[in-house]
Amino acid sequence: MDYREAGVDINEGYRAVEKYRNLGAGTRGSLSSSVLNDIGSFAGIFSLKDTAGSMEEPVLVSGADGVGTKLDIARIMKKYDAVGIDCVAMCVNDILCHGAKPLFFLDYIACGKLDADIAVKLVEGVAAGCKEAGCVLLGGETAEMPGFYNNENYEIAGFTVGIVDRKNIIDGKAIRKGDALLGIASSGPHSNGFSLIRKALPDMTEDFDGMSLGRALLEPTRIYVKPVLDLLQTIPVHGMAHITGGGFCENIPRMFPACGNRSFNALINSDSWTIPAIFNRIAAGCAELTETGSKAEKAGAELLQVDKSLRKQMFNTFNMGIGFVIALDKGDAQRAKEYLDSRGFPAWEIGSITVGSSEVHFE
């Protein structure tokens, strides 16, 4: 018996890695001089000489995340590149919350039986996400694990490292009572809540505004890095939150300072933006309504207005159309909103900071 008979095709792995190498090289851009070796070595090597620039005290900021059960929809729809973007977005948006610029990214792909074409599609998405975030795909790992994963399923996770000058770290200590909360539009559910979505919406072929529901749900997570980093150059920001699993109630308090005697609440006006139609459809599914298509969207929207329990559940699980939240002085909110709008990232003033005990309340 050899390795192939045990279920691992080494040649398929070689074929995938060769394509990864080209994809990684295509993400280097302005950071090319910082990358000191190619994908395929034992480790990725990255120089900080040029990236630290004039920083007084460069600090590295890291984050790791995955895509979760959204991968099952990618499998059903046979479309894998979008979840590669998601994997990058979930990591780089997290470190952005502390003002860090992503430098490089590494991915981890696992499966039961490797199909190089599928693996390459995943990494094509990762490379696209890296380009959008302005970081380098520095390396990764592809693990073929027969008998552990079934032959159809893939797992993908990732890890990013960014940099910020210590004096510019955003840690919530500047947050004050009366600060405005600016919400930036999401592109859909992003990569969270899909265990519930898959239960609530079992038919991925259902029509959703002219496309299949599965295709709509695969819309990649929006990457906020470039416009927000640019915003930080002109407007003082006090705190930032990436709205991921746990929705508003879990993530907004994470921007509050971890020490000191001050305690804050977030007061959210959930009527200050229009909840995207996909969440209305999810709400109808969660309520186990029998309608489908546009009728379900309409019924879900109506339910979200009258069913307080369902509305609370949705805001505790999903981003509901707001993928990133910024706390800043109320006098700067309109200017920040206009800037983000001009960059193609619609934003709304969705609430304010009040005194409290690290909770989120809705008005």
Image: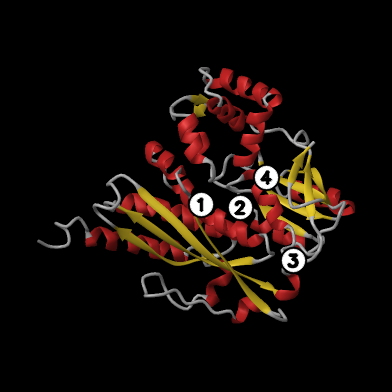
What is the spatial separation of the Cα atoms under label 4 and label 2, in whole angstroms? 18 Å
Q: Earlier in the sequence, mark 4 or mark 2?
A: 2
Please tell me whether mark 3 or mark 2 is closer to you in this view. Answer: 3
Mark 1: secondary structure: helix
* Tag 2 residue: 223
Rendered location of residue 257, percent (x, y): 74, 62
Answer left or right for 332 relative to 204. right
Quadrant of the image occupied by residue 280 = top right
Please tell me whether mark 4 or mark 2 is closer to you in this view. Answer: 4
* Tag 1 residue: 85
Quadrant of the image occupied by residue 228 = bottom right
Tell me, yes or no, if residue 237 can be seen here. Answer: yes
* Neighbour tally class for label 3: few under 14, some 14-19, many 20 plus, Cα within 10 Å: few
What is the spatial separation of the Cα atoms under label 1 and label 2, in whole angstroms? 9 Å
For the residue pair 150 and 46, the one nearer the viewer reads as 150
Mark identifier at residue 248 = 4
The residue located at (65%, 75%) in the rendering is: 59
Mark 3: secondary structure: loop
